[in-house]
Image (cartoon, helix red, strand yellow):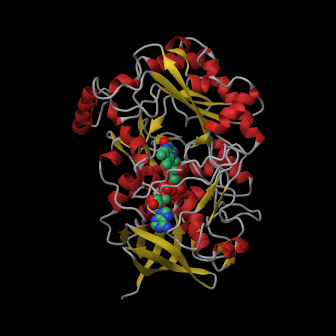
Amino acid sequence: MAIRSYDYIIVGAGSAGCVLAARLSEDPATKVLLIEAGGPDKGWLVSMPLAWFRAMTTPSLGWGYTTEPEPFADNRPIPEPRGKLLGGCSSINGMMYSRGSPADYDQWAQMGLSGWSFSDVLPYFRKSETNWRGASAYHGGDGPLAVARHLNDGFVYPRLAATAQAMGFKLLDDFHGPEQDGFCAPDFTVKRGRRGSTAALFLRPALGRPNLTVQTRTLTTRIILEHSRAKGVEILNDGRMDKVFAEREVILCGGAFNSPQLLMLSGIGAADELREAGVTPRHDLPGVGRNLQEHASVASLWEASGRFTFDSQLRLDRMALSGLQWLLFGTGAIAGLPVGIQGFVRTREGLDRPDLQTLISPVAMDAKVWFPGWRKPRGDVFSVSNVLLHPESRGWVKLRSADPNDKPRIRLNLLQAEADRQAFHRFIRFTRDFFATQPAASLVLRETAVTAAPRTAAEIDDFLRSAVRTAMHPTSSCAMGLGPDAVLDQNLKVRGLEGLRVADCSSMPLIVGGNTAAPAVMLAEKAADLIRQRSPAMSAS
Ligand SMILES: Cc1cc2nc3c(=O)[nH]c(=O)nc-3n(C[C@H](O)[C@H](O)[C@H](O)COP(=O)(O)OP(=O)(O)OC[C@H]3O[C@@H](n4cnc5c(N)ncnc54)[C@H](O)[C@@H]3O)c2cc1C
């Protein structure tokens, strides 16, 4: 069999990988191979925004990960959905566009990672997007990633907005303008009513390039190391093992669980742990899989005082009409998500940026299409999702075995840190205050029994242990940094090796205070320039 060789091999066609492949293959003289373990991103489950909850729980679209029993969450294994298809998580996620706070990136730079301050990364956020607001100092006007406005609910939104103002918060036009603190409707990566994954918006337009090869349903099982240089990868496709070679670099974009797993399978990690798993150590790098960070999230439910929530839209005949509208025009209830309002809030004195992201939706997350005589409606409720933006708790990813088909072991240690538990006490108080303030108070009858019951500090601690889950934003398991646990340098290169980088959410030194898809896109945009040794100004031209 002929030896296959490329300039760059990218492992993982996810949020970051599709962007990187599209950017590197812009140079026709550069041969790029993009390898994806999952299949294509076809079908309405992927493209229909309202179907995201079904998409994320559809086994054929995901890796099916759950954590090890979580010691600070009643020893519950907690699901961690991850997309296994073209677009990765961007093909199954909630599409909310968020960058985090400028201070998050300035903190990366203060850690010694030059080139990662907010003013350094802003050009890449701008380059990647076409924002509905048009180009400005904060936004891009001609990038591939469509960032669209969410249609506000004409009844619920003004009342939630007025409540936020009555509590003294600012009503913003944009979470990514001069200020992040306040309330506003979020933006979504949706284009003409269809999911705007990175597969759809970055990769698909590049597929016709003769210098770009995309190989789906192919698991990368090992990085081929020669001395201290990555020379290529071993792959498994349809039961057949093969090898492909990289003239210049191998770049891992497998996400926060799979990138560290692949490094460890290749002998790159903490030598003693690798031996325990049956892998011969090749390069002792103890930080691989450590420093795992995740946004803990706790929900509450509130019974609505009338039939004005999204539940009424879910009646079968109305959904059928919405479906038709969506198919024909890409508009209507199905073309977006029923989000009421979002807030970024500092819940205690002395913080330099928000610690709470609160999302109030006029619908239960498990609501289904209903019709009298067929299925009962879920009922009119508001669901509130409170997300801890800067957790102190740290988890890990380890090998279960030397078999690349085995899922990695994941422990998040959610709520391990006392500070994280205390934050949720504040968040619960905050949401109760919100719904005690007019006009939101008149939108609800009461908090539903389960989330209303905990009142004392001890009861709230018990409740948190039983209810905490994730915002599905794992990061930092192959973190950039300068210290002994750093896996990558500031150029995303694996320390001590040649020809090997990691560019995905695992590369973040600290989790950002917002959702993680747009930062993954930014990371890949910047990785492309680092690899091509270009500056933002050069790549904008
Ligand atoms: C259900 C859900 C909802 C979310 N909602 C939002 C949201 O609304 N807004 C937001 O900003 N963020 C959201 N997120 C988080 C966000 O989507 C992810 O953090 C981000 O997209 C991860 O990007 P990534 O490039 O690091 O990894 P991924 O997008 O996970 O990409 C990794 C890719 O690599 C492939 N791969 C892995 N290992 C191998 C291997 N060995 N060989 C070949 N291929 C491999 C995977 O199949 C996958 O396609 C959500 C996530 C989920 C799961």
- The answer to whether 142 appears left or right of 349 in the picture is left
Foreground: 396 or 494?
A: 396
Instruction: Specify the farthest residue to the bottom.
Output: 1
The reply to whether residue 517 is in sight is no
Foreground: 368 or 91?
A: 368
Q: Quadrant of the C terminus?
A: bottom left
Residue at (59, 42) in percent of width and height:
469
Q: Quadrant of the N terminus?
A: bottom left
Q: Position of residue 127 (x, y in %)?
A: 48, 51
Counting every numbered tag in the picture gives 0
- The answer to whether 481 appears left or right of 61 in the picture is right
Q: Quadrant of residue 450?
A: top right
Q: Position of residue 485 (x, y in %)?
A: 74, 63
Residue at (41, 55) in percent of width and height:
87
Foreground: 459 or 479?
A: 459
Q: Quadrant of residue 297?
A: top right
- The answer to whether 98 appears left or right of 280 in the picture is left
**Residue 215 drawn above or below residue 349:** below
The reply to whether residue 166 is in sight is yes
Q: Quadrant of residue 309?
A: top left
Instruction: Specify the farthest residue to the front.
Output: 373
**Residue 71 drawn above or below residue 454:** below
Residue at (64, 49) in percent of width and height:
511
Residue at (49, 53) in percent of width and height:
82
Q: Position of residue 106 (x, y in %)?
A: 68, 47
**Residue 475 drawn above or below residue 456:** below
